Amino acid sequence: MTASLLPPAPAKAAPKISFVSLGCPKALVDSERILTHLRAEGYELARRHDGADVVIVNTCGFLDSAKAESLSAIGEAMAENGRVIVTGCMGAQPEEIREKYPNLLAVTGPQAYESVVAAVHEAVPPAHDPFLDLVPPQGVKLTPRHYAYLKISEGCNNRCTFCIIPSLRGDLVSRPAGDVLREAEKLVKAGVKELLVVSQDTSAYGVDIRYASSPWRDREVRAKFYDLAAELGTLGAWVRMHYVYPYPHVDEVIPLMAEGKILPYLDMPLQHASPSVLRRMRRPGNQERQLERIRRWREICPDLAIRSTFIVGFPGETEAEFEELLTWIREAKLERVGCFEFEPVGGAVANGLGDPVPPEVKAERKRRFMEAQQTVSVRLQKARIGKRLPVLIDAADGTVAKGRSKYDAPEIDGTVHITSRRPLRVGDIVTVKIERADAYDLYGSAV
Ligand code: SF4
């Protein structure tokens, strides 16, 4: 046998994927999973559509405006590249997309990771190099390295009348607690300082699998909101709970916040406070006793920060119902609040539930709502002046930095603007003395 005198063949260039991720943090987690899988197979990420072998657009179909944004992102990808795979919530209604863009390579629905990957294989086969370890053990993160979203379930068992997510994503499917905890542990080992727990309905975690136990470390852990929160609280990272509804069993988790095991923060989208509107919205949880429940939580954990979102101008919303909401928001004194004008979503039951509220009335109610909340926010923010708060640094430029206290989630809440004598680094947790506040942000110096 003679050795070949030919030079080795040049390594085949790795195929490149350009990726657009639209929508909520849950969709972002889907994007990360798809990318982790593709990176493991040797695909690379392209910065621009025109240099990529294929473009994947992970769409959002929650509101009509989100659909329009998704369609425009698909249009852009088609114009700049032409080889496009569509996935995500809008992919559950392929006809609508195909009608506009008949030449797409594939359209797959939400959570259809395997179909997306199969479509990519068909469009451009992987050039896998088994000797290279292409993926960091914690997977590919689209969020900065110091925080990460942790998705604990898919789908939703509720049927809120303004929402079509259950028809797009199906009923609740919870991940075993052991899987979630292993992922969380890997993330923390890789340097993640804050875990943001997301799902459609975090407090319903495990209902579908009857809270089944699964092994983690040397023990069995139940797939239950409390058990998961308690175990996550042992990992040494900030743990922030999103999309929690005011079910009675949420009460059990508040002491974990009071003890500093998880952050004293609840993202609880309440949507309204008028019992009649809540009934028409068919919201989960015991919504009519919200104030009482919140009051009790604050007795146990006075530090608790609650963020919520509300919809004004729901079909048939009367002035009296809106006034109920205004009174409620003044009494509840929530730390962070978002307000949206009702927008009909194609296929949602709510669209036919009452007379539509005219656009100018919706806008006026939103303005009044935000004004009422602004007064609450300013007062709560001012109460933080003089306090020393731990702050997680999100961005730093030498001795000037921006970060978040435990009361603020990334992207949706406020920022702490910091000056410091020593240089700060992204991912550091520093103590900041708060010197000034406005309705959204805090300002202070590192001590
Ligand atoms: S809880 Fe309601 S709004 Fe949230 S995903 Fe489920 S059905 Fe939609």
Image: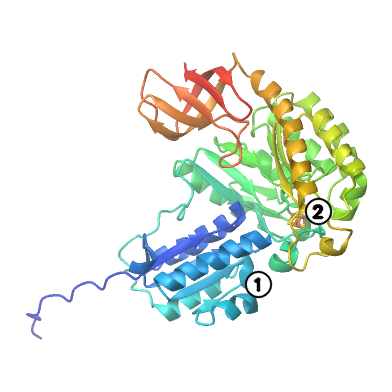
Q: In the picture, residue 282 is in which quadrant?
A: bottom right
Specify the label residue 358 is tagged with: 2
Q: Amino acid at mark 1?
A: Ala
- Which is nearer the N-term, disc 2 or disc 1? 1
Q: In the rendering, at what x and y percent does residue 115 appear?
A: 55, 75
Identify the residue at horizontal 60%, vertical 64% (top origin): 68
- Where does the image place residue 36, in percent across and percent down from the top left? 46, 61
Q: Measured along the vertical axis of the image, is residue 311 above or below residue 131?
A: above
Residue 434 pos. (x, y %): 55, 18
Residue with the mark numbered 1: 92
Q: Secondary structure at mark 2?
A: loop
Q: Give the CA distance from mark 2 to mark 1.
A: 30 Å
Where residue 291 sits, quadrant-wise, is top right
Image quarter hosting the N terminus: bottom left
- Establish if 162 lies above or below 14: above
Given residues 13 and 334, the one toward you in this image is 334
Number of numbered discs on residues? 2
- Up/down of 44 relative to 198, above or below: below
**Quadrant of the rendered image holding ligand 1:** bottom right
**In the figure, is residue 425 to the left or right of 390?**
left
